[in-house]
Amino acid sequence: MTPSRRQFLKFSAGVGVGLVGGARFASAQEPPPDPVDPIDPIDPMPVMVRADALDQATRGQQVQINPPPPPPPANRWSPGDFISNVVVENRHMAFTFDDGPSPSNTYTVLRALRDRGAKATFFLVGVNVRAWPQIARDIVSEGHELGNHSIYHTPYRASSLASQIRGNQSIIQQETGVVPVVHRAPGLTRGSSILFTCAQENLYECHTHMGTSDYVSPRWSSSRLISQFSSNLRNGSFPIYHDGGPSRPTRYAVGAMVDIALARGYGLHTATGLVNIGTPVPGRQSYPFLSRADAEHAGHDVNCCPYDARAGLLERLENPTVKHAERSRIVEQLAMFDDHLKLEGE
């Protein structure tokens, strides 16, 4: 080993010993660290924070501007109930329209209601729903209630109309996805068989205690209907109007009638909405001017209500502007109607 190499190794060893000795001296001079208390009474334990809470903190305090709507009121009707009107505080009513849907009237009625933010109940006839299913769907899409008004609107016999309730429930559900909870017999026909079937189908029967005359023939003018509505308007009522069949003055009167009700402070509801905010009043099982036997079969407007669902289909079929798809649906419903009339012996 050369002298220069021996000198280098001695120098390196001396430096290493010096560093070790210095470290020992330093450790001997420094006081030992304080023991760590596993539960420090001053510093809180670390808290695990969820990621969504951290995200909330970075976004700041969130304020719900629009509170969720309150739950709807509980049903105040039971299946099979027969309701003529509602006892309710303040002023409330429900517009109702029978015999639709119809391409001649329903859209005009819907527009009048939409422009005023009003809701109503439409009692639909099954053959019309099959003939014009899109109109029925549009009634639903605008937030209105659908009611059951028989398949054929004839004959005015309680047993026959009761036998059509279940079938019309199926028709309305198939075409619109809605299962009605309210039924109104054509002609306001009354009978225990209707109420019994309503109970089976989870329906209540809705009539009225407010006089209207848009069903009579010859037709009243729209101005006369408006005047009558203004005079007869009653709290808790279900005024009955009609949108089925050919064009009728009612469709031009609806807007003014809604305006009158709103100007007088009435809240406007669907039929079931009105029932659920008040106390339903039972209807009478018979009319005072009819015998008991007649009450089982006859309607309030027998020989007065000229609406004929079959005639309405035929009249539409004669319109040269009707397209093939609609024409086919009408022809199919007419065939069903004729089969029904044969079964009824008419």
Image (tube, grey):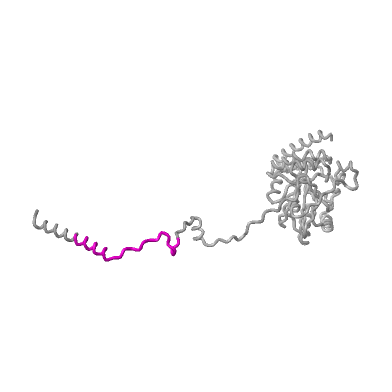
Q: Specify whether residue 34 is painted magenta.
A: yes
Compared across the picture, whether 68 is left or right of 220 comes to left
- Which image quarter is the C terminus in? top right
Residue at figure coordinates x 83%, y 49% from the top left: 283
Residue at figure coordinates x 60%, y 61% from the top left: 65
Percent x, y for residue 97? 77, 49
Q: Nearer the viewer, residue 3 or 326?
A: 3
Count all numbered tags in the image, as a single digit. Answer: 0
Residue at figure coordinates x 79%, y 35% from the top left: 340
Percent x, y for residue 322? 72, 42
Compared across the picture, whether 25 is left or right of 90 comes to left
Q: Nearer the viewer, residue 109 or 261?
A: 261
The answer, for residue 100, to whether it is visible in the render is: no
The answer, for residue 113, to whether it is visible in the render is: yes
Q: Is residue 129 above or below residue 57?
A: above
Percent x, y for residue 235? 80, 57
- What segment carries the magenta color? 17-44
Q: Specify whether residue 235 is painted magenta.
A: no
Percent x, y for residue 60? 52, 62
Q: Is residue 340 above or below residue 187?
A: above
